[in-house]
Amino acid sequence: MHGAAGRVAGHRYWIAVVFFLLGMAPGFWVPILPNILKVRGLEWLIPIAFMAPPLASILSPLMFGASADQRISAEKLLGIL
């Protein structure tokens, strides 16, 4: 069944399900990560383990955005999208 705008009826909340599944994986391992690192004797790694993902999420768009700007112009990309 397709709606008037070409959308599949009944799939209204698919993005909510996708974001839930994306957040579920870190939700499983992040709470127990400090315990695992302490047992293995890697307490010094705990601050680095919790600092790396936010830092990567800030820096990666800057790096990859700059390289993407060199390869394709923003106007072409918006035209494709």
Image (cartoon, rainbow, N blue to C red):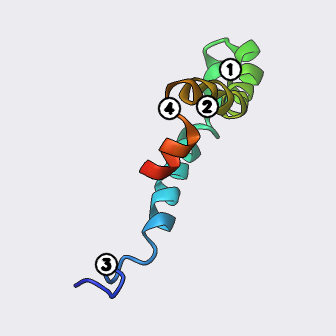
Query: Which marked residue is nearer to the observer: mark 4 or mark 3?
Result: 4
Q: Which residue in the structure is indicated by mark 1?
A: 38
Residue type at the position of mark 1? Lys
The mark nearer the N terminus, 1 or 3, is 3
Residue at the image point whose x is 36% and y is 82% from the top: 5
Query: Which marked residue is nearer to the observer: mark 1 or mark 4?
Result: 4
Q: Which residue in the structure is indicated by mark 3?
A: 6
Compute the Cα span from label 2 to label 3.
Answer: 32 Å
The mark nearer the N terminus, 4 or 2, is 2
**Which residue is at the front of the view, 28 or 64?**
64
Q: Which residue in the structure is indicated by mark 4?
A: 72
Residue type at the position of mark 2? Gly
Compute the Cα span from label 1 to label 3.
Answer: 53 Å
Residue 65, numbered label: 2
Residue type at the position of mark 4? Ile
The mark nearer the N terminus, 2 or 3, is 3
With 55 as the anchor, is 1 left or right in this view? left
